[in-house]
Amino acid sequence: MGFKRVFWSGVVGMIVLIPMSWISFRFLNLTEGLTGGLLENIDDALSIITVPVIEIIAGAFIGLALVLLFPIHWCIYYRPEDIGLVIAVTVPWILCCVIASGLFAHSPRGGIHTSLAIGIGYAIILTVGYIVLVVALPMGSAILDGLLLGLTDLPYLV
């Protein structure tokens, strides 16, 4: 697979991760699992919105934020007994990589390249977002690092 093909398969895979995150958020109770039951029924609160498309989009981006902020090793280390949480965090990535690889890859090597392109693409986007926040706000990095250290006990750029 050439660079152009890997790049576009990664972009499509990144787009596919958004609805897969919504599935994890809506049906696998991702928010309740990550917060240990502290935040419950956020998906039901979103159902109050009268426009179903906005409800789905909001749920998808909340799920995407949770999937990106809480890595799989965090779930295994801090909640080893909660297998549902590990499933809720890994299912969007697995489905995303399988769908994108099925669409673009012609070999197992192409599937690995597609999966790596998806992960590296999100890492680039999150790093650029972090740098923009640091440049835009004087205390931007301290705010983001403090928030994520409080949530995950991990620094932002792991």
Image (tube, helix red, strand yellow):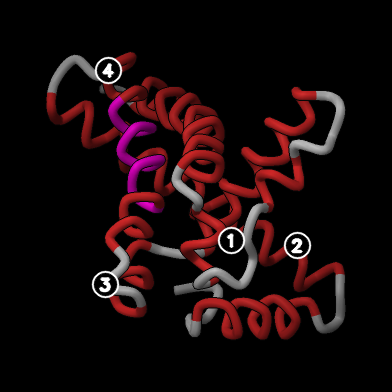
Residue tagged by mark 3?
A: 81
| Magenta stretch encompasses residue 156 | no
Asked if disc 4 and disc 1 are in contact, CB closer than 8 Å, the reply is no
Q: Of label 2 and label 1, which has the lower sequence position?
A: 1
Q: Which residues are magenta?
A: 89-98
Give the Cα distance between marks 4 and 3: 33 Å
Residue tagged by mark 4?
A: 102
Q: Residues within 10 Å of mark 4 (few under 14, many from 20)?
A: some
Residue at image position (62%, 38%) is 60
Nearer to us of marks 4 and 1 is: 4
Give the Cα distance between marks 1 and 3: 31 Å
Kindly identify which numbered label has been placed on residue 18. Answer: none
Q: Nearer the viewer, residue 102 or 57?
A: 57
Give the Cα distance between marks 4 and 1: 28 Å
Query: Could you tell whether 134 is left or right of 86 in the image?
Result: right
Kindly identify which numbered label has been placed on residue 132. Answer: 2
Nearer to us of marks 1 and 3 is: 3
| Magenta stretch encompasses residue 90 | yes
Residue tagged by mark 1?
A: 127
Label 1 secondary element:
helix
